Image (tube, grey):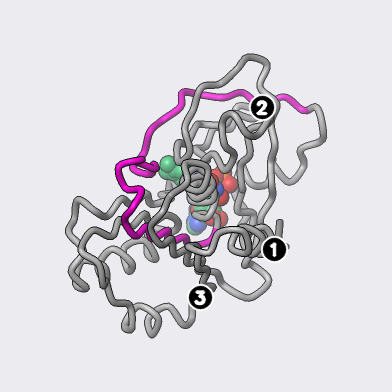
Amino acid sequence: LSTTVLRLRLVAQRPVRYRAGQHVVLWTSGGIARPYSLASLPDEDRFLEFHVDCAHPGEFADAARQFKVSDPVRLGELRGGALRYDPDWQEQPLWLMAAGTGLAPLFGVLREALRQDHQGPIRLVHVARDDSEFYLRAQLQALAAEHANLTLEWVLRSELADYLLQLRVVARQTHALVCGHPDTVEAFAKRLFLAGLSRNQLLADAFLTRS
Ligand SMILES: Cc1cc2nc3c(=O)[nH]c(=O)nc-3n(C[C@H](O)[C@H](O)[C@H](O)COP(=O)(O)OP(=O)(O)OC[C@H]3O[C@@H](n4cnc5c(N)ncnc54)[C@H](O)[C@@H]3O)c2cc1C
């Protein structure tokens, strides 16, 4: 999807029941197991899609770079995490704030919200190291062209502090879903809290690593 983000699509041997925003442990045939978020939508996609950050060396990332079509990958248990779309939010503002491959589950949640005909404004913010890492940009722009209530913002990580300073929560009913690298998730969460968003309207999932 970009120079550092690998898109992995798996075809499950048996149907997998999941919802947008969930994650699952992926096992390589060599026995390396790591959690990854589902970027696909049940009912709409015939494959399970994952976005693997390969920017840094890592056991799973290194193995994933070598995957070939038809290689087996085992799936562990599906986990809920915090991220989801709730139809009760239909009329309310929905903010989706992703850092790096934190876009994976939020892309799924976004498509689910649009599928359920979300009526309130949707704001998607993608934070990345540099311009070339704003992946899925064309797909997001195509969705925004079809849905007038969807606005998109791309923010460089070096400009995140300034971006956060001008962030204002206008509607008290706003629901914010934040996902990605722990530092960025924390920065968003702090700012949203200071801007007046109540804690139960903030759903955050940080991509903790083993180290
Ligand atoms: C619920 C959940 C969902 C997730 N979803 C996603 C997702 O959709 N996409 C995604 O890209 N990631 C996701 N992650 C994060 C991903 O699971 C971790 O980053 C995972 O550890 C990567 O595995 P790896 O084997 O490639 O790297 P690891 O070998 O586990 O290393 C993790 C990081 O630490 C660094 N590192 C390793 N050893 C050392 C060392 N000795 N000193 C310094 N640095 C070191 C590596 O360079 C690497 O960047 C998710 C995490 C969680 C908890």
Please give the label number shown on residue 155: 3
Give the label, 2 or 1, closer to the camera: 1
What is the spatial separation of the Cα atoms under label 1 and label 3, in whole angstroms?
16 Å
- The 10 Å Cα crowd at callout 1, few under 14, some 14 to 19, many 20 or more, is few
Tell which of 92 and 99 is nearer to you.
Answer: 92
Q: Is residue 140 magenta?
A: no
Give the label, 2 or 3, closer to the camera: 3
Q: Which residue is mark 2?
A: 73
Q: Which residue is mark 1?
A: 138
Residue range (magenta) = 71-100
- The 10 Å Cα crowd at callout 3, few under 14, some 14 to 19, many 20 or more, is some
Type of the residue with mark 3: Val
- Tell me what residue is drawn at x 31 percent, y 63 percent: 186
Give the label, 1 or 3, closer to the camera: 1
Tell which of 113 and 95 is nearer to you.
Answer: 113
Q: Is residue 64 left or right of residue 209?
A: right
Tell which of 29 and 11 is nearer to you.
Answer: 11
